[in-house]
Image: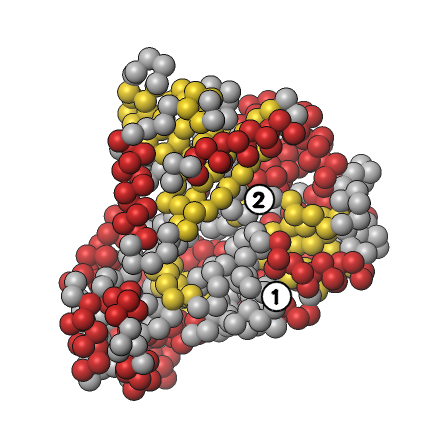
Amino acid sequence: MDYKKEYEKWLESSVLDEASKEELLNIKDDEEEKEYRFSTLMDFGTAGLRGIMGAGINMMNVYTIKHTTYSLGKVILDLGDDAKSKGVVISFDPRNHSREFALTAALILCALGIRTYLFDDIRPTPELSFAIRELKAISGINITASHNTKEYNGYKVYWEDGAQMPPDMADKVHENMKDTDVLSDIDTMDKDIALNKGLLNIIGENIDNAYVERVLNESEYKKYTKKYCDDFKLVYTPFHGCGYKLVPLVLRKIGLKNLILVESQMLLDGNFPTVKSPNPENAEGFCEAIKAAKKNHADLIIGTDPDCDRVGVMAKNKNGEYETITGNQIGALILNYIIKSKKEKGEFEENFAVTKSIVTTNIVDEICKKNNVKLYDVLTGFKFVGKKIKEIEQENKYKFIYGFEESIGYLKGSYARDKDGVVTSMIIAEMSCYYLDKGMDLFDALEDMYKEYGYYDELTESVYMQGLDGAQRMKETGERLREEPPYDFAGTKVVKVRDYLNHSVRDLTTGEVTKLDEVSSDVLFYELEDGCDVIYRPSGTEPKVKLYILSKGKDIKEAKEKSEKYIKAIKALI
């Protein structure tokens, strides 16, 4: 695509608003910026779109929102009148322009004659997933960029099962986008007319009530939160986002009295003024929460990201300092807690099933093996967990109880098909009180779990490849690793290589190559002779390569040493 011609076309367009024209005139002498904005369309994957807000075809703005929504609407129209009648549910987060983008999308669909349900205010991402199922809608749109910085926004598309849109449907949307110009004069509908015709339906409290009820049904042991409600203190922060209302509501409903809210971060603000990045994986975002925790001598800190699908945790260690518990550790602790509590209550069943991503801690394999729980490994991205839940229910052999991925995303139960920060906050609080009853904190519980199942460590690092050539460099790195595969990492032999892009498993000991029956994904998975794993995966939403080390040792010190050794070895190849 000729970015210069596309830039000029936007400037000359009668459709473009004056503010966007002024923005583009301000970059008229910046060729690199013009090329970034106009050289290519944003890629529509199964998770939809995500990008920096601004004017241009590679940016998030009302024109790209209209273009994408019209393309999605055409897919729905092709499915017939039943799909039109089922409709689309739309939610949004507190980011700048999210509310505007959500209404824009709704009115485009209404103009196409498609019933639309629009939330009256911001809502957690998992509530959208639940609402699609509750309202029996054909699809859902969520305006959010999850935990990205304030410059970003996004457009996530869901399907009728509540999971993110399946690849075949996403491909159809993408094809429609290529066939339609971004600045097409796409029909929209006046909001009042859409309301009067019954095409636009505003939803809110009724869905909240139904959703909260289903979340509370996933409680394992409310008796412990009620037993220790006078002693246990929890600090919560929503990072200026969607968890501000429902997380505190649910925590109080399970009995917590000493709930301390980080007031400076309860403010809904798309500029996220108190943090560099609203990502609860990063400890720096918890500075305000730690102050509140120290002031109130709290036991635990929980933070949810702006769309409330991810949860970060900090707990007080033996030195009285607040320390991060990693996504892998929390995920494994929750699973172990669910199994323990169900066994204690006599509710454990032999057909329980758990799902985790391939880059998630291997201690889960051992926990499931020793407790006779069926474990499914899926590709990275919660859409694959959602897909597996559907398959488990259709097969009707196992009962799904829990799924998670290392990037602090967890789901207990099957009422939704996306990770849920609301239910996870509830389960973590319950789990903390459960161990408090046994004279333990979460670090004690972690050590206890390691003693029972083995010592595991996980290390994840990102290598950023910014700029116009970032995508090309990522592609070339992957090609080189496939053409010149490493046969060892820091002297430890590679025994097997799983290539999820080429659907192959190569045994380096025997030379045998077998087929890998998975959806295509740009992932290289190296199994080492000492039982550790090294994984290479380019991000699908950001200009970076993610590297994962899954280690095991005779103790935690050895496991961590292996992680450090192997991360240096894989980074040297990038």
Q: Secondary structure at mark 1?
A: helix
In the rendered image, the quadrant that contains the C terminus is top left
Q: Quadrant of residue 88?
A: bottom left
- 447 vs 378, left or right, is right
Which amino acid type is marked by label 2?
A: Gly
138 and 514: which is toward the camera: 514
Residue ranking furthest to the right: 230
Which residue is at 62% across, 26% downward?
Answer: 558
Which amino acid type is marked by label 1?
A: Tyr
383 and 476: which is toward the camera: 476
Tell me residue 384's x, y (percent).
40, 42
* Residue of label 2: 327
In the rendered image, the quadrant that contains the N terminus is bottom left
Tell me residue 387's x, y (percent).
39, 42
Query: Does label 2 or label 1 sit earlier along the sequence?
Result: 1
Tell me residue 485's x, y (percent).
32, 28
Residue 14, compared with residue 145, is above or below; it is: below
- 326 vs 357, left or right, is right
Which residue is at 71% across, 32% downward?
Answer: 447
Can residue 27 be seen in the rendering of this structure? yes
